Image: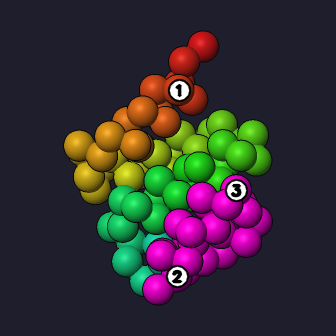
Amino acid sequence: FPLLLGQALLEQERWADAEPLLQRAVEAAPASAEACVGLGRVALANADRAQAIRWLRRALAFAPYNRQAAHLLDQVSAP
């Protein structure tokens, strides 16, 4: 449930509201690529490039073919 609500808040760009829910989702399911991507999006919204890269790499470690994670990581890693 925290993951779904967190994702809904991301769609509304309510980054601060989404973050604790996504954190809870990762605590409940550490291999949740979706929650990691969500936290990567929150980090990007907060201009925390290093943290975004960490979350997106973690997402890809669990789901190597996650297109959203790969796309966002390409964007944030570009010079």
Closer to the N terminus: mark 1 or mark 3? 3
Q: Residue furthest top?
A: 79
Residue 45 can be seen, yes or no:
yes
Residues at discs 1 and 3 in contact (Cβ within 8 Å):
no
Q: Secondary structure at mark 1?
A: helix
Residue at 49% across / 36% down in the picture? 72
> How many angstroms separate mark 3 from mark 2 (CA)?
16 Å
Horizontal side, residue 14 vs residue 32: left or right? right
- Does residue 9 lie above or below 40 as drawn? below
Provide the secondary structure element on which disc 3 rests: loop
Mark 2 or mark 1: name the one nearer the start of the chain.
2
Q: Residues within 10 Å of mark 2 (few under 14, many from 20)?
A: some
The image quarter containing residue 50 is top right
Report the residue marked by disc 1: 75
Residue segment shown in magenta: 1-24
The residue that mark 2 highlights is 2
Give the x, y percent position of residue 22.
56, 71
Q: Earlier in the sequence, mark 3 or mark 2?
A: 2
Residue type at mark 2 is Pro
Quadrant position of the C terminus in the picture: top right
Q: Residue at x 53, y 26 (%)?
A: 75
Q: Are marks 3 and 2 in contact (CB under 8 Å)?
A: no
Front tag of 1 and 3: 3
Residue 4 percent coordinates (x, y): 48, 76
- Numbered circle sitting on residue 1: none
Q: Quadrant of residue 33?
A: bottom left
- 31 vs 41, left or right, is left
Q: Is residue 31 above or below residue 61?
A: below
In the image, 43 versus 1, the foreground residue is 1
Q: CA distance from mark 2 to mark 1?
A: 27 Å
